[in-house]
Image (cartoon, rainbow, N blue to C red):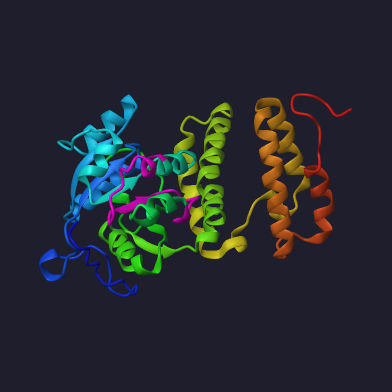
Amino acid sequence: MAAYRPVPPRTGTEGPPRVNPSQQPRPARLAVGVVGAGRVGPALARALQQAGHLPVAVSGVSDASVRRAARMLPDVPLVPAEQVFEKADLVLLTVPDDALPSLVEGLAETGAIRPGQLLVHTSGRYGTAVLDPARRAGALPLALHPVMTFTGTEVDVQRLAGCSFGVTAPEELRLAAEALVIEMGGEPEWIAEENRPLYHAALALGANHLVTLVAQAIELLGKAGVEHPDRMLGPLLGAALDNALRSGDAALTGPVARGDAGTVAAHVSELRKHAPGTVSGYLAMARTTADRALAHGLLKPELAEDLLGVLADTEPEGGTAP
């Protein structure tokens, strides 16, 4: 493998990470392989290709993976995972979290991993310890988790511009990790090995649960007769997200933060009639909202008692309390 000469890390004052290649020293070109042609791997390989690296092999099992690889990485051979390691200097392991440990162990046991090979996984849950079997085989382990949702289309490559990456790497590979993230258009954010599960839980709480909440809101608005729920929610949710990112709990509004127990009780009653599957989630989020509003002085204590009484409602979904 050609020696990897990473670019200097950014300090945050240089502007956008993409630069004119003719004006900046470049790291050596790497042959890039992808194991797991889900939504993430092909997009990262395309981003590295745009930075001057060369995708040489991709592996995928499902029909959807094969189609995605053909669309995102045309002319790149689709081969078994072992052959990806034969061809690549840098291998992206973009498989589901639960599949990663056994995959790494199996690859190490079969001797597929070559000494000096950069091995990158994109799991948010794991740091580099999960790559220890590969490290013992001579691989150079990196954990580069893009903090982004992926669609499996070209738009993913564009969204990497300015995207944060949760990075964990041995100290001696720190510059290499930073260089790869910057070349993909991202911003490295260092996460300690022991903090990876908490870091990932925070992202899942914010992003994955947001999708569920929005989908439920769209369904409920449809039942209420709104013709275009997405158009109605877009400006509201955009403003709420912007306010929350800027101001945190100070951005809380609505009946729970105001202590409007009667309104919240009406919500619960309507949800029981029209969408009983949403009640438990509504109550759980409302209780959490009330706790945070109280702690930050937004919910007046004299209004909290009645509100918390409504939120303590244990009536079973679709029925009445005994």
Quarter of the image holding residue 263?
Answer: top right
Q: Position of residue 236 (x, y in %)?
A: 51, 48
Q: Where's the N terminus, which quadrant?
A: bottom left
Residue in the picture at 34% in, 27% down: 62
Residue 114 within the segment the image draws in magenta: yes
Q: Nearer the viewer, residue 187 or 250?
A: 187
Q: Residue at x 28, y 70 (%)?
A: 15
Q: Judge whether residue 127 can be spotted in this image.
A: no
Above/below status of 31 relative to 79: below
- How many marks overall? 0
Range covered by the magenta-colored residues: 106-129
Position of 218 with respect to 30 (left or right) is right
Quadrant in the rendering for residue 103: top left
Q: Is residue 219 magenta?
A: no
The answer to whether residue 88 shows anywhere in this view is yes
Q: Could you tell me residue 145's position as x and y percent?
A: 41, 53
Q: Position of residue 214 (x, y in %)?
A: 53, 40
Quadrant where the C terminus sits is top right
Magenta segment main secondary structure: loop
